[in-house]
Image (cartoon, coloured by chain):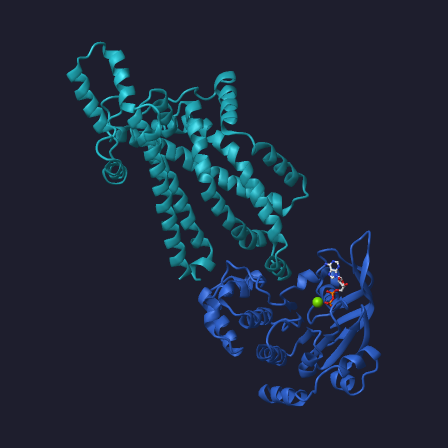
Amino acid sequence: MRLVNFIAGRIAVYVMVLAVGMTILFFVPRFAPTDPVDAMLAKIAVQSGYMDASQVDALRASLSDTFGLDGSLLEQYGAFLRRVFVEFDFGPSLSMYPTPVMELISNALPWTFGLLFSATIIAWVLGNFVGLLAGWKPNSNAGRAMEGLAICLYPIPYYIVALILSVLFSYVWAIFPLTTTIRGAPWSWDLVRSIVWNSFLPAMAIVITTFGWWIISVKAQTQALKEEEFVRYARLKGLSDARLLGRYILPNALLPQITFLALQIGLMFNGSLITEIIFDYPGLGLLIYKAVLQGDYNLLMGTISLSIVAVATATMIIDFLYPLIDPRIRHG
Amino acid sequence: MIEVDNVTLGYGSRNFITAVDGASMTIGRNEIVGVAGESGSGKSTLMRAIYGDFSTGLRLRSGRITATFPDRAPIDCSEMRKTWWQDISYVPQGSMSVLNPLMKVHKQLIDGLPKHKRKGDRRAIRRDLETFLAGLDLDPSVLDAYPHQLSGGMRQRVLVAIASYVGPHLILADEPTTALDVVVQKRILLMLVEIQRRLGNTLVLVSHDLGVHYQIADRLIIMFKGEVVETGPTDEIFANPKHEYTQRLIGSLPRLGTRKSTVTALRRATP
Ligand SMILES: Nc1ncnc2c1ncn2[C@@H]1O[C@H](COP(=O)(O)OP(=O)(O)O)[C@@H](O)[C@H]1O
Ligand SMILES: [Mg+2]
């Protein structure tokens, strides 16, 4: 019963987050002082020189349509939601005309997803492992050193770490490429090597900025758990340190870490967008950046809607891992 | 089996606070020893020292505690760890958080055992556990339960089962029935007595409740402000308490009338 409640509650939150996010995304451009159609027309007029009035009107009508600005506000809202959730269609990109926005996004998404997923796993596993040991022996030299490292690392913003890594390892010592170029035939070893090689620094930037936080939080968990009655009881049963850590402390320390991961994933997503821009990495972040720079309204709406959906979905999936570990929710 | 010789125990190193002051006693084979005394009189401290649990600042300042288990050379309490969950086990007070919330009961039943008993044919171990629980009148379904699914009384019975599955020579139980209602309390006391009779080992039961001791203890140790003030067979102490504190303790009890019936019923039930 608790499990059903948990899942239903979580899905309700998911739907609400999406509804709120999409509504804001729908209304914000409509409150902007400039009309995107006029702005676009002006831009096209500059590029193509003279246009007569009938051409301008035809262009205005078609732009109005692609921007979804036809009909009453309610109709526009309905059409917008249909585009996002049913048709998955945001029209053509204006800066890379006539490539559909959806095509650009579906090319970029695997990069962002792959980068974020691998960096998150590495940071989470490494941070939890180090934090667990640091919390187990908090007064050892290694434990202190690890905590010091974590405290130094975790307030540094993404872009600083990304810039430092990029300057040090692509410029001063040109070990890794400065910008991303992927080479190799599809499904070949060369391709894999090229991807790993090009993704190493961006991934490291995310790992370094996030794993300090994991160390700090799991260390606090471990130290608290050491004093728990059930750990004390297990120790008095004569269990070895390794089994105490592996079977009693670790699983219990990881539970809140899953919740934290769900809370952090949005922040990490933002971080990876910045990282992508710095390393010229062909993901969603770079796409959003280009859309902003070039005033590509369709592309911007498409990338942002997708970001909202992606982050909300990832958060929910992580939350669904929780009952797999915690029997108190599984068998309520 | 256990020889406590003029032991002074306390906490902290720089500011040593005495908790047990010059206590001496003997715990023999095949008996139920009750340790009584008001809260703060040092019962738990003494038990921890006998068990060899010198964590959280507990220190043995003077005296010695020696254990002599069958098939083992006499051992000092500082080395007691080697015998944990083999010769000696203990029953903690079964609060909500004494079992690992993420682990099923059957795993927690065997995970203190030495490796060769823990590993092996899973189905054989499972069958053994089920038979064992049935012998204690516990439903085998508790094996697959998580701690949060058990009631307070059931959790305490599981803790007793865990400590006795080891088949140790000595079981220490520190306030195992405190915070439980009288019916459940009685059930657990019966369970403890039955296990002791069956294994023929020694049970040391700590309780501030003299009524509990009256029901099951063969011998009593009365503690008062960190000192052992009186020891002797339960019947004798109840009939003729010597120390002024013991007299007060017994005087404050409501009418007693269950000892003979409980003990004889138990003796009859377990030949
Ligand atoms: N971990 C500890 N650290 C410091 N003092 C303690 C600790 N445990 C118990 N004491 C003190 O030792 C004395 C005896 O306590 P305890 O052995 O728990 O008594 P009892 O079990 O009879 O209630 C008390 O004064 C108590 O405050
Ligand atoms: Mg106590």
Q: Nearer the viewer, residue B129 or A95?
A: A95
Chain A palette colour = cyan
Quadrant location of residue B228? bottom right
Quadrant location of residue A102? top left
Say which residue appears at 71% left-offset and 77% top-offset: B33
Name above or below for residue A218 compared with residue B235. Answer: above
Quarter of the figure that contains the C terminus of chain B: bottom right
Say which residue appears at 64% left-offset and 39% top-offset: A142
Q: Position of residue A77 (x, y in %)?
A: 27, 37
Q: Nearer the viewer, residue B69 or A202?
A: A202
Instruction: Confirm whether residue A187 shows in the render.
Output: no
Say which residue appears at 18% left-offset and 20% top-offset: A57
Q: Nearer the viewer, residue A263 or B144?
A: A263
Instruction: Confirm whether residue B266 shows in the render.
Output: yes
Name above or below for residue B253 compared with residue A191. Answer: below
A315 sits left or right of B113 in the view: left
A252 sits left or right of B89 in the view: left
Q: Position of residue B250 (x, y in %)?
A: 76, 82
Q: Quadrant of ligand 2?
A: bottom right
Quarter of the figure that contains the N terminus of chain B: bottom right
Q: Position of residue A54 (x, y in %)?
A: 15, 17
Q: Position of residue A127 (x, y in %)?
A: 53, 40
Among all residues in the image, which is located at the extreme left? A54
Say which residue appears at 76% left-offset and 76% top-offset: B221
B219 sits left or right of B101 in the view: right
The blue-tinted chain is B
Among all residues in the image, which is located at the extreme top? A49
Q: Nearer the viewer, residue B68 or B92?
A: B92
How many numbered circles are shown? 0
